[in-house]
Image: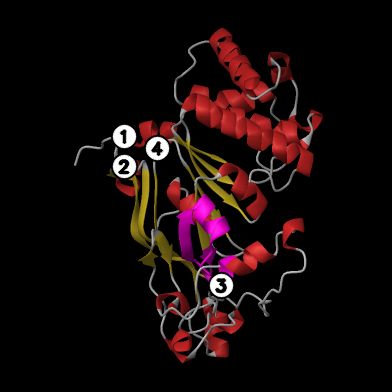
Amino acid sequence: MKPTDAMPLVEARGLSRTFDVSPPWLNRVLERRSRQYVHAVDGVDFAIERGRTLALVGESGCGKSTVAKLLVGLLPPSAGSVRFDGRDIARTLRSADAPALRRRMQMIFQDPYASLNPRWKVLDIVGEPLLEHGLAKSSAELAQRVGELLQSVGLGSGDMQRFPHQFSGGQRQRISIARALATEPEFLVCDEPTSALDVSVQAQVLNLMKDLQRSRGLTYLFISHNLAVVRHVSDRVGVMYLGRIVELADKHELFERPRHPYTRMLLDAIPDIRRTGLDRTPVQGEVPNPLKPPPGCSFHPRCPHANERCKVEQPALIDSAGVRVACHAVAEGRIGVA
């Protein structure tokens, strides 16, 4: 099928990734233990339209970063698929079209201190993808292109001769963004790109990313545990819990009328002076051990609305008034829209 503008640019279908975390063979034999597996991502479905931003939120360890790596081909899926512009990326990356696909999707990592080579100058860091993809034919052209990229993210062309340790955290992340933009991609996967930055610097970087999206028509997958950040940058929001999406909705719908109890718990954790004095239902407990997830709905040990069905039957992600929710209590009408 030929891709069209009406099709989503990125689409995940039944996306799963399992990791073997078993002890060494001899330990298993001596201790009589079987292999152990972690289902980091378990049957995730979503689509991202061109020029739009989908945010994935959830507590640490819920599988957000694994989804990011699956989408750009850094990890192969255990099951399911990712389609980019109508084509399966796993097949494309095994074909002669792999370099062209790599140019069209890039990733911005969480820690700008770890993602930049400390021994390279900015010219080498930002220029590497230009040389790798043959986008700069000479050293003069390389310097010109790198200078333009640095200026597009609010830095100066003179910064290309400096090393990463000579920049602040926010400036380093701008260098990471410039490197990601070097191949003129259409799709950027942003794995908590502002979590290592001060709050004031976060706002500057987020505003820069929104400006770049408008001017370049970029499509984003934005991963964060900070719902305040997500509210600022996203168009749609997917809430993840233990490797599964439990709620997927437009931003305004999710923040104004959350349905899943876990989404409500996350929203209740956001300080809001307008909600002072309102009664809240706190959710107790911690995230279960992913090596031994609870049967049925994985959220049921922490959910105030759980019943016997929740303890034995895993809820499917169903449509509810344009919102996709995986919750028996919502499906049965035991809890309404918040």
**Are discs 4 and 3 less than 8 Å apart at CB?**
no
Labelled disc at residue 261: 3
The quarter of the picture where the C terminus appears is bottom right
Q: CA distance from mark 1 to mark 3?
A: 44 Å
Where residue 202 sits in the image (x, y, percent)? 72, 40
Labelled disc at residue 216: none
Q: Nearer the viewer, mark 3 or mark 2?
A: 3
**Are discs 4 and 1 less than 8 Å apart at CB?**
no
The kind of residue tagged 3 is Pro
How packed mark 1 is, by other alpha carbons closer than 10 Å (few <14, some 14-19, many 20 or more), is: few
Q: Earlier in the sequence, mark 4 or mark 2?
A: 4
Q: Which residues are magenta?
A: 240-263
The reply, left or right, for residue 168 in relation to residue 149 is right
Q: CA distance from mark 1 to mark 2?
A: 6 Å
The reply, left or right, for residue 160 in relation to residue 190 is right
Where residue 294 sits in the image (x, y, percent)? 52, 83
Labelled disc at residue 92: 2
Q: Residue at x 68, y 44 (%)?
A: 194
Q: CA distance from mark 4 to mark 1?
A: 21 Å
**Are discs 1 and 2 less than 8 Å apart at CB?**
yes
**Quick one: SS at disc 2?**
helix
How packed mark 4 is, by other alpha carbons closer than 10 Å (few <14, some 14-19, many 20 or more), is: some
Q: Residue at x 36, y 41 (%)?
A: 9
